[in-house]
Amino acid sequence: DNANQLQAQRDALAEKLQETETRNKDLESQLAELEQRLESSQLEQEAFRRNLKTLLEILDGKIFELTELRDNLAKLIEGS
Amino acid sequence: DNANQLQAQRDALAEKLQETETRNKDLESQLAELEQRLESSQLEQEAFRRNLKTLLEILDGKIFELTELRDNLAKLIEGS
Amino acid sequence: DNANQLQAQRDALAEKLQETETRNKDLESQLAELEQRLESSQLEQEAFRRNLKTLLEILDGKIFELTELRDNLAKLIEGS
Amino acid sequence: DNANQLQAQRDALAEKLQETETRNKDLESQLAELEQRLESSQLEQEAFRRNLKTLLEILDGKIFELTELRDNLAKLIEGS
């Protein structure tokens, strides 16, 4: 009868809601994990880029010093 | 009475399920987007590292050529 | 007597002239040899300087290529 | 007569000797000057070579430092 049918519908909906909420929690934790990974990947990339910038500055210094050496060699050749 | 109460419970559960499924879809699309970003970030990083490796090989070549120049200068000084 | 004295003076002068001319020839050959050494030393120095100029040009090229590499590294870091 | 002839010979020889000794002095001073130039040229060349050796050592240092930079870049690429 009608009361039994309504009860069956209610129970089926409650079960379905339960599953959907479980799936929801799972998705939320996946999302949190992925955000964590993306953030730590960005932090690594920034640290990497900072290290590269330091190497770039050292390379600038070496090129400057080679240019000084070059100028001293040129003066030596001209003056000899 | 009982039938009215069951119907109210069923309708409340149906509405709650609707909301939870909507939230689910939203989470799934957020997750897909984040996976996309993480993947394209990894592809960029790999391309970046390949470019750096190319620069490293060029630097190797330059150091080799400077060493040849250094040896030629040493020979010139010794032979003079 | 006077004729004998004149003859002795003449002979002494002739001998002295001989020695002086011998010494002269010796000095001229020393001078020629030294001029030769100075000239070949100058030719060597010029060849040496030309070789140094070639090395200087190669060094210029290497500094230019390192600067290109530096610029490519800078662009890579900025673009990442 | 004989005495006049001998006197003329003696005087000619005395004059010739004078000229030869003057030429001698000139050659000796030329020789001394050339030896001076050769010696100072050698001193200059030695100073030049010492300066070149100093530049060679500086170049060695720069190549060493570029190699360190290269190794640090390689480690950075491998570690990323």
Image (cartoon, coloured by chain):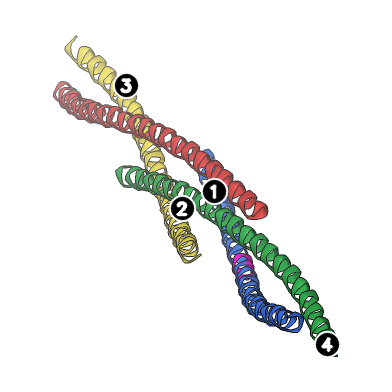
Chain colours: A green, B blue, C yellow, D red
Q: Marks 3 and 1: same chain?
A: no
Which residue range is magenta in the image? B42-47
Residue at coordinates 79% horizontally, 85% vertically from top-left? A6
Using the image, tell me which numbered label, if any, was put on residue C15.
Answer: 3
Q: Amino acid at mark 3?
A: Glu
For the residue labelled by badge 2, is the local secondary structure a helix, a strand or a loop? helix
Q: Where residue A51 sits: x, y (%)?
A: 52, 49
Numbered circle sitting on residue C55: 2
C45 in relation to C29, above or below: below
Query: The N terminus of chain C lies in which quarter of the figure?
Result: top left
Tell us which disc is closer to us: 3 or 1.
Answer: 1
Disc sitting over residue A5 in the figure: 4
Determine the secondary structure under disc 1: helix
Distance from disc 1 to disc 4, alpha carbons, whole Å, reads 98 Å
Disc 4 secondary structure class: helix
Q: At label 2, which amino acid type do we have?
A: Leu
CA gap between label 3 and label 2 equals 60 Å
Query: Is disc 2 surrounded by few (<14), some (14 to 19) or many (20+) residues within 10 Å?
Result: some
Q: Which residue is mark 1?
A: B72
CB under 8 Å between discs 2 and 1:
yes
